[in-house]
Every structure is written in structure tokens, then in C-alpha cells.
Amino acid sequence: MASESYSSSTTQSSPSSSSSFTQPSPPHSPLPNASPDIDIPVLISGAGPTGLMAGLLLAKMGIPSRVIERDMVPSPLSKALGIHARTLELIKMTDTNLFEQFGSQSWRSESIRFYFGGSLVADAKTKPSKDSEFHVPWMLEQTRTVQILAEEYEKTGMGKVERGWELLDTKVVERDQVEEKLAEDGSIKSTATMTTSWVETTMRRAIDGSNKRKSESVVLGTVDMAEEDEGKEYEIKVVKSEYLIASDGGRSTVRHRLNIPFSGRTRDYNLILFDGCVETDLSSSSISFIQGANRRSIGMFPIRDNRVRMMLDDGRITQEAFDAREPKVPSKDFFENLLQETLGPLKLKVLSYNWLTYYRVNERRATEFVHKRRIFLAGDAAHCHSPAGGQGLNAGLQDSYNLAWKIAMVLNGTAPQSLLDSYTEERIPIADEVIAFSAIILDRGRYQGFITNTIKRLMLTMMPIISRFFPTTGGRAPFNMLGLRYYESSVNKVHKSQPYPANAPASVGERGPDDILTPLSAAPTTTATIERSGSLAELEDDSTEQPRATRLYELLASPCAFHIIVFTADRLLLEKDFDAGLSKDIEHYQGSWLSKWPGFGGKGLSAEDLMAQKTSTPHFLVHVITSKDLSESPSRDTMASRTLGFGKIYQDVEGGRLHERYGMEATKRGGIVVLRPDTHIAFRVSNIDSTAWADVDEYFGSILTVAS
């Protein structure tokens, strides 16, 4: 249908649908209560990292989407820089090429330097972690993150970024539909009312130029409702989608239109953010934090090509004083003078800059993240905080990962819509934790008085000596987000007769621990210096006599799949014919699950075909881990010859380190742990006999839906 245009000085004409948003034959199964004429299964508002990651994940899971973005071109500003360990794990599991793109374009700092009054007092070196292969953040400008994600998203052929489109309004439309059942004689036997719902979004695009107006509010949490520029004409479209993901930033139009409160505070702390080229005697490869004699502080992060990002403490300024400040952006002279006062004897000269701005610290969260199970807030639209600790971009990408697999399973007919309620249930506590942690980091980085500052300096000075007497795994540092967890909920369930403490190792809701494993197709190799191995395909095709070590997380790189981890302890070595019984249970239950919930592209295939991996994305993959060397055991050949993800066996390192990390070292009977597609622990049961497998089967039946 042809689009219509209107002048801002006249009444808007009736909007029309856009053929560019239409997917006539989407490869998913429409929901039973969805509108029959949906334009696109998922519409995403905002082409930042959060929205693009959501689109890419959905594409990997077979769900078409469209991303709309008001700005005609991506922002050239560096904005968020740090990508932490937990996010890197998720990126790697999403797509090998995506991970390689991030790896080739980012840089790592192996140390963090702390200066007080111009003197270097500590140089903290990073150390490898047993809990994750990523022991340092990867630094990459947000503009490049957006570029990588957008390119990989559009390569899938399942989505497109539509630039220049501004979301005006959105709502969930609900319609009651009466269904009649007829008796044999044609009379009405019974009637039932079913509610059909969908999302209806109105958007516009300027015929000429951009959608930006000459004067717009930039106050967080508000949407500018000023009059339009005179004479400007727009193209209007209405798009119907089953779901809308709002990743449209701190001033989210979607959040505003739905009247969702964005409660919190604007703090008196004011920062100056700088991105540019400098000449300095500070390290070009280390992150540096400087506490100046003038009671101000600086965080400096090298980027590339002699460029750095700096976060300069501008002091405590009330909102009234900040509003009255002129000019509204810092001048180069003002910045350089404050910078030099803080640096003291340290040398740094500004050569040029791309970005120089004031940054008011806001700590806010939407009161709800889900609206009528159809519209979802993610990223800055849902929560915001200070840049201290580099948590924002990472929290947004993890919002996308939590949400995408749930939407995909619902659209595929695998799970009921009630699964979507767990997005709010799980991500709101995480948002609160991230906001609180970022506030702590901000406060600790600033001058807090003479006594506190002196203690801080003393502790940093002594850190290289003190750290020698403490073990350093590096895995649970709060800023790397590996310790963020969910708790018992509608999707994370504690065994009804096997209580397991929430503070015990690998409890329900925690991120599943990672560690090194050795495939049992030959004698184990030395793994002490190995941090990570190649892709899953390389692991599967490896025919050398000495298979190289891998990591558990290498086995989890399958989109939208539950991973069933079977810890056998030493039973395969000690119990005769135990492998036969275990193999029988794996084949029976995995085959049963794949028949009920075949995964994307698996409908119509037999259980035998699915077990032979003739479908691209099965929903259930099984991995077996033994704590003992089975090189001389007859059971080795049976389990080692299995296909990856279908009961293939691996050996734990150091006599069962991964068993210990999953809380399996205390039992001699082994156990089963179910990891969700985002690798959080959904269910666990002691023992690996048929009764334990039946318990896992009952768990899946409690959260998934058998398609009719």
C-alpha cells in the first residue's frame, strides 16, 4: 500500500501499513491468540547495542524482526567502552564470527594504575581466571560495537535496520473473539470467548531531512512534546507486531507513552566526558585512575590511535546551579584548566577531541519492564546509572539475552506466554544491583575526606604485597558481572525433595561455572596453560590422537538450547555396565524432549532424525562429564563416540574440579544440572539414575508447553 505524507501544520491523514515491514511467510508458528495479519513478529525500537543484540539473537533463533531508529546515521561518539567477562561469554555463544569481530577490533589492558597527587602508588596486574577465559575487559568504542552488531544482524537475512523512523505511539490492542462449537444437528453447543492481542506501533519519517526538531528537551525521563517545525512533512506508518522491544534509551518514548514511571534520582555529581587525542607520559596501554591534590579525580582509558577516554570529576553541583550554568557544554579551556589542576606534575596535552560534554549522574529504573506480555523495556529505557564500572552497555546486552530466548521459544510454540513474565521477575533485581554497584564505584572513586583518602592510598600501596597471601581466581570480581545471578522463580526451580541452599556452589539461578575439559577420544593432554580452544566444529572434527582441551562454555554455543550436564563422578569407572543404563536414559529422554519440542527447523522430523542432528537448532543438548580417567575403561568407547551434544563424554580436570564447582564433589552418585539457554542454572538433581531423569523431565513439563 502506498504511504501517505502530511504537513506538520495540518491534520495528519490516516496512516498506512509498510510493505517493508511485512513478512508474508515467517518461519515461526504464530501464537494461538495472535492477530492473523502481523507485519513482523518482533519490532525493536532503537538501534543501539541492546536493540541490535536482541535482533541478532532472535535471528539466530529463527525469528524475523525489524529495528527502527530515529537517527539517520549511527552516533560517531565512543560512549560505552568496556565489555565485561559475562557479556563476552554470551557474545561468543551467540556466533563465532561475531566474537572474532569483537576480538579483532578491541584492545585489552593488562593492568590498572592508581595515582595519588601525581605519584604512582599501585599497578594492579590482571591474572587468568579459572572461572572464565576472560580475565580482563575488552575495550571497544560503542560506535564500533553498533557497527559490528548491525552488520552481523543484517547478514542473517532475518532482519533489517530501518533508519529515519521515529516511534510516535505504541499500544497493545486486545480484541475478544467468540468461538462457537456446533452440535451434530447444527445448533450451537457451546461458546467460548478468546482474547486476541497484538502490538500496534505508529511511526513516522521526515520526507526531507531528519526527524529532529530545532529545539528539543534533553531531560532524562521526559519526551519533548513541543510543536513541530513549521512546514515539515512526514511519511506515516502503522506496524502490527506480536512483540515490541523498547531499547530507545533513557528518554524512551515507549516508556513515556505507556506511562511507566522511571523512578530514582539525579545526583549532584557532575562529570566531564572527553574523547580525543592526547600527548601524555601516562601509560598508553593501561587504565589509569588519578586522585588529584585538588580533590578531583580522573579515569583515563586508552582507546586507539593515540586516543583516550577521560572521565573528569567536575564536583558536586546542584540541579539548579547546573541549569543556570553557561555555557551548557564545557569549553576546551575550562576542561584543560581543571584537567591540569587534577593531574598536578603528570603531563597530558590535549591535541584534539571528538567529544566533550557534561554528564549528570542519574540513577533510575522503570517500575515495570513488561507491559501486557507484549512490550518489553531493555537497556537504558529500563534502567540507567553512572558510567562508573562500565556496567550500562553490558547490562543492556544481558537484558537482550535474557529476553530473546524466551520470546523465541514462545513464538516457536515451545513455551507458554507466561514464560515472558520471568523477564521482569529476573531483570529488575539485576538492574537494582547494577545501579547500586555503579553508585558505590562512583563514590569510592571520588574524594571522600582526608581520612578515607589516606586509608585508600595506603591500601592501594600495600595491595601488591597483600595479594600474595590470597588466592586469586579473578572470576568473581563484581565489575565483570560473572557473579550476577537469578533466584528461585517460575523458571528456576529447586528440587521438591532435595533442598539445596541458595549460597551453595552452583545453586539454582546462578550462572553455570566454566572450566577446562578434555574430550575422551584419547588419553588426556596437559591443560595447565590452556585458556580456551577453537570452535565447536573444530572440536567435533578433531581427529588427532591427543585431543586438545576445551572449556565447558565451548560446548554451550547453540542458540536457544537447554544444556543438560550429567556429572557421573567415578561411577563409569567403578560400576560395571553403568554406561549402558546411562546411554539408555539419555536416548529415551532426549528423544522424548526433541519429539515434544523439536526446536527451530525441526518440526516434522522424527526423533531419530533429530537425534542424528539433522535439525539445525535442537532445544535440548546433553553433555556427560566424568571425574576420573576412563582411558582403560570399556565404557570409554561407548560414550566417547557419541555426537557432540547427544551424550558425548568429557573428562574433568584435576580429579574433578568442575564437579566441585557445581557442588557435585560431596556425592558419589553424581548429578544432573540443567542450564538455560543463557547458561543460568534452571534445575539440579542429585543422582543420575532413571528417577533423576524423570525429575528433569517433570521440570521441563512444568515450564514448557506441548504443541497441539
Image (cartoon, rainbow, N blue to C red):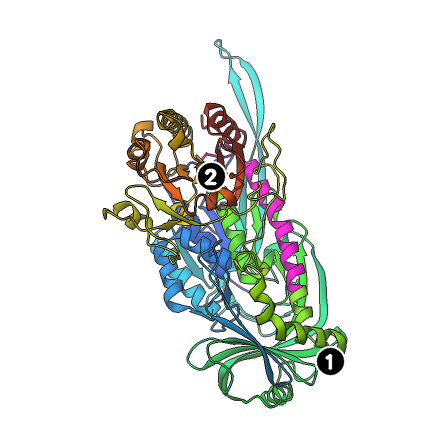
Q: Nearer the viewer, mark 2 or mark 1?
A: 2
**With 597 as the anchor, is 435 left or right in this view?**
right
Q: Quadrant of the C terminus?
A: top left
Q: Main secondary structure of the magenta part?
A: helix
Q: Which residue occupies 65% across, 55% down?
A: 433
418 in the magenta segment: yes
Q: Name the amino acid, label 1.
A: Ala
The x, y position of residue 193, in whole percent, is 58, 26
- The mark found on residue 43 in the picture is none
Q: Which residue occupies 30% across, 44% down?
A: 523
Looking at the image, can residue 425 be seen? yes
The x, y position of residue 583, in whole percent, is 36, 28
Residue hosting label 1: 324
424 in the magenta segment: yes
Q: Which residue occupies 52% across, 59% down?
A: 474
Element under label 2?
Answer: helix
Q: Name the amino acid, label 2.
A: Met
The x, y position of residue 339, in whole percent, is 61, 86
The span shown in magenta is: 411-439
First in sequence: mark 2 or mark 1? 1
Choose between 552 and 397: the one closer to the eye. Answer: 552
Residue hosting label 2: 409
Looking at the image, can residue 236 be seen? no
Gap in Å between the C-alphas at discs 2 and 1? 51 Å
On screen, residue 627 above or below 264: above
On screen, residue 654 above or below 564: below
Number of residues whose C-alpha sits closer than 10 Å to that of mark 1, classed few (under 14), some (14–19) or many (20 or more): few
Choose between 113 and 87: the one closer to the eye. Answer: 113
On screen, residue 584 above or below 486: above
The x, y position of residue 554, in whole percent, is 39, 49
